[in-house]
Image (spheres, rainbow, N blue to C red):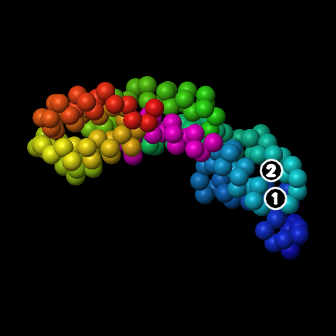
């Protein structure tokens, strides 16, 4: 087979570039994600960085654009908080300063309390107006779900106050900062 070296899974520079393009067609990748994917298939030393550089020059790889798109999607459709999105971007290899700046810009106009309410509505499968949660176990479960979704403790407590009258527990939860 042309372009394939020692083993069938190792690709030459040009084939590695084509492989990267096919990967980018399926979904956007950060530089770090693409670098890891290409490193497993590279037959030539230095080929991965050459391919990444060429992809950047041609505008196919842009970590800032991936971070912005990911942040907007997670805010608008997954209804998650900024802390969760920031963690996801860091795991995807976006540079910390870029991730922080992009998430801050995307969430600047967002009302996190409203996002948390919408997340909770989806989780409970109903409008919050008719919901009253009295059990501490259920309240703790919902608190944990909202915390994992990336909302800050004071936002979670404020939203849960709308569905529970256990002010003592909510006051205690408001002072806990999960994930920092």
Q: Which quarter of the rendering shows the C terminus?
A: top left
Between 121 and 147, the residue placed more toward the observer is 147
Query: Which residue is drawn at the image coordinates 39% and 43% (left, top)?
Result: 148
- Where residue 81 sits, quadrant-wise, is top left
Q: Quadrant of the N terminus?
A: bottom right
Residue on which the image places disc 2 = 48
The answer to whether 29 appears left or right of 112 in the picture is: right
Labels 1 and 2 touching (C-beta < 8 A): yes
Residue 70 among magenta residues: no
Residue 22: which disc?
A: none
Span highlighted in magenta in the image: 77-93
Quadrant housing residue 56: top right
Tell whether 104 sits left or right of 91. left
The disc at residue 42 is 1
Q: Where is residue 13 in the image (x, y as percent from the top left)?
A: 85, 56
Q: Is residue 64 left or right of residue 130?
A: right
């Amino acid at each position: 087979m042309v372009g394939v070296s020692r083993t069938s899974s190792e690709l030459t520079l040009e084939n590695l570039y084509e492989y990267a393009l096919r990967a980018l067609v399926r979904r956007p990748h950060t530089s770090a994600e693409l670098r890891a994917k290409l490193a497993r298939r590279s037959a030539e030393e230095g080929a991965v960085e050459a391919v990444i550089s060429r992809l950047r020059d041609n505008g196919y790889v842009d970590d800032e654009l991936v971070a912005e798109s990911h942040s907007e999607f997670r805010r608008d459709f997954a209804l998650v908080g900024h802390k969760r999105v920031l963690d996801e971007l860091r795991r995807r290899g976006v540079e910390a300063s870029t991730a922080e700046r992009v998430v801050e810009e995307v969430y600047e106009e967002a009302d996190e309390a409203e996002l948390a309410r919408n997340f909770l509505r989806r989780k409970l499968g109903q409008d919050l107006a008719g919901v009253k949660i009295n059990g501490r176990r259920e309240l703790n479960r919902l608190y944990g779900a909202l915390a994992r979704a990336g909302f800050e403790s004071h936002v979670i407590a404020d939203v849960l106050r709308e569905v529970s009258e256990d002010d003592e527990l909510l006051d205690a939860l408001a002072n806990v900062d999960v994930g920092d």
